[in-house]
Image (tube, rainbow, N blue to C red):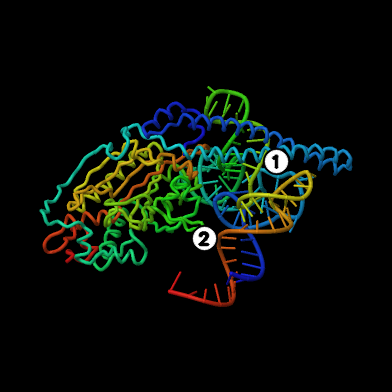
Amino acid sequence: MLTLRYIQENKDFIIERLKIKNFNALEIIKQILELDNQRRSTQNNMDNNQSELNKLSKEIGQLFKSGKVEEANHVKDRNADLKENIKKQSEELTKIESDLTGLLVQIPNIPHESVPPGKGEQDNVEVRAEGTKPDLGEKALPHWELAKKYDIIDFELGVKLTGSGFPVYKGKGAKLQRALINYFLDKAIDAGYSEVLPPLMVNEDSGFGTGQLPDKEGQMYHVTADNLYLIPTAEVPVTNIYRDEILSARDFPIKMTAYTPCFRREAGSYGKDVRGLNRLHQFDKVEIVQLQHPEKSYDTLQEMLNHVENLVKSLNLPYRILKLCGGDISFTSALTYDFEVFAAAQEKWLEVSSVSNFESYQANRLKLRFKEDGEKKTKLAHTLNGSALALPRILAALLENNQTPNGIVVPDALRKYTGFDIID
RNA sequence: GGAGAAAUGGCCGAGUGGUCGAAGGCGCACGCCUGGAAAGUGUGUAUACUAUGUGAAAUAGUAUCGAGGGUUCGAAUCCCUCUUUCUCCGCCA
């Protein structure tokens, strides 16, 4: 969420920039500024009344002490009026503030100046593509058939146990999942990230902090009995570790990595997009998160991109990097790059990572601030995160691209984690 | 799940109705002392909002002692609800 101050000072700029995200902010900003004026005058009046009340209360104490009971009772009457006013004003203020927040959360983050215009994914800009697509010939099988052939992923069994989108990994398939998780985690730790293993359910405050609530409520599984949400990504619990914290500028960068299962309802998805591993309700992912000084966050974004690129490269998968256009970039992000790998049997690009700089948008919701050395004023930190990596589509591409008549060849980088070099 | 105790600033901890945003200690920052350091010593050390100020600084006001509500002219202090932590019992990987 944008800060009020920022909106007050950059109204026209915001309206102009949000056109890139195909968002018309004119009306909502007008309402916000109007409400903010009300908020300030209400607060001012209330403070003045409260101040008066406090002063009179002290007088009453003095009067009682010196035995002037009648006078004291007289002042009490005046206080009753003040209290009445304060109560009304306080209720009004609460209402205004909640309305104001309700409006503020509707404004998306300002896109970075380099975000290209566009309506949807077709307008994303390819930064580069690397690696060679394997030539599999006619007989190439898509991963869901390979999974069945080698009995490593059982989609039907998942349906029996839970429902569609909850596959059961078996045998070497299960081991391969563990191998990928460990490999990705080790790589992140080597790159200076410290590992955390967070809860898989979060409360409302956490959901609000990273921006899943209130707007994306329908995308999360909601445990209504306890009002908890299954995390759609480790980003949520990990970033919220620093909710309500004031850091020192010297603490930056804070680098964290986490493996978690992720749960997504994927309401509205259907058809070939959800075939096999392409889109699941539960999947595994290793996430990297950084908190950084505002002046350095774009360097950090680059660093994270390099990290993800090295991962994909080390698995010998053909990949491309896309810079998301205004129409495809998420509500909370200022700049996002997607990584896609090519699954050669489906002949499709599959998104395996999304790396974003949220600048101070999440930090403002999180109240995640920092102080410069020797300064009193707090400033908002910048938050960034990226998948490094999401497993199912990596697995899909590995299975499809590495299929041979003898079985599926495990990439070198993973062999010390799997303990086998072929799935047959 | 049942019974009891507790929750105060970065940390420890005092504070049972007004003079308390809160003693004291630790930590931290800056200064003095020192050849340098330690010890000693002095000063400072929460956050948010509002007003004045072009901004920054500054000044004043308001709120915040787990959260929310109540009693009272006045609440860290009394009452209620909730949350969390600890101890005991029960259940349990």
Q: Give the amino acid at mark 2.
A: Ala
- Vertical position of residue A402 compared to residue A247: above or below: below
> Left of A295 or right of it: where is A37?
right
Where residue A351 sits: x, y (%)?
28, 48
Q: Nearer the viewer, mark 1 or mark 2?
A: 2
Name above or below for residue A250 compared with residue A111: below
Count of residue discs: 2
- Cα–Cα span, label 1 and label 2: 34 Å
Residue behind mark 1: A87
Label 2 resides on the chain identified as A
SS class, disc 1: helix
Q: Could you tell me if the residues under marks 1 and 2 are in contact, i.e. CB atoms within 8 Å? A: no
Q: Which residue is mark 2?
A: A225
Tell me what residue is drawn at x 85 percent, y 41 percent.
A73
Q: Nearer the viewer, residue A47 or B47?
A: A47
Look at 56% across and 30% down and name the residue there: A34
Percent x, y of residue A295: 39, 36
